[in-house]
Image (cartoon, helix red, strand yellow):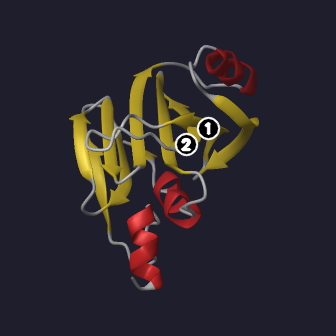
Amino acid sequence: MTGEAGSAATGDIPDNQVFLVFRDGAAGYSMKYPEGWAQTGAGRAVTFRDKNNIVRILIAAGTHPTTASVAAQLRKLTGAHVSAPPRSMTIGSAPAVKVVYTTESARNPVTGKRVTLTVDRYYLARGGKEAIVDLGTPVGVDNVDAYRLMIESFRWR
């Protein structure tokens, strides 16, 4: 296998990946995602998957999150091991909170195996709505640039 093909097989998002824009008018947001990834759900709960990569977007009523409120939510998250504490940041011109944690993937339906995922979780809010965006990838797989492109493309509508 060539380097690019071998990386793609492990879950690396290739540098030449094409991205599409997912828009949901009812939930009030849009965000880029990799072309060819399987989509499940719609509106307030959408997931995109490919191999062991996962992008999950949940929209609910909420106010602007704080690092303290995010830390409290994480304590309730079963099986998550925080590897970087919540920190405030800006995405676009909107305030956000980011936390990084590891967790186990769902079992592969064919092999029954699970992999450890690193998840970058972002909390964004506007107009009484909160978005929780999870960008998960297997430990050791470098999808930093692709995931940065995706989260920076998030827009409230």
Quarter in which the N terminus is drawn = bottom left
Q: Can the viewer see residue 123?
A: no
For residue 78, above or below residue 130: above
- Residue 120: give x, y in percent of width and height: 59, 44
Residue in the image at 41% along x and 46% along y: 54
Q: Which residue is mark 2?
A: 116
- Residue 94: give x, y in percent of width and height: 59, 43
Q: CA distance from mark 1 to mark 2?
A: 7 Å
Of label 1 and label 2, which has the lower sequence position?
Answer: 1
Q: Nearer the viewer, residue 104 or 137?
A: 104
- Residue 112: give x, y in percent of width and height: 34, 38
Q: Secondary structure at mark 2?
A: strand
Specify whether 83 is left or right of 22.
right
Residue in the image at 27% along x and 47% along y: 23
Query: Is there CB contact under 8 Å for labels 1 and 2?
Result: yes
Is label 1 or label 2 in front? 2
- Residue 25: give x, y in percent of width and height: 25, 38
Q: Nearer the viewer, residue 136 or 90?
A: 136
The residue carrying pointer 1 sits among few (fewer than 14), some (14 to 19) or many (20 or more) residues within 10 Å by Cα, namely many
Q: Which residue is mark 1?
A: 102
Q: Secondary structure at mark 1?
A: strand
For residue 29, above or below residue 5: above
Specify whether 65 is left or right of 32.
right
Q: Quadrant of residue 105?
A: top left
Q: Quadrant of residue 141?
A: bottom right
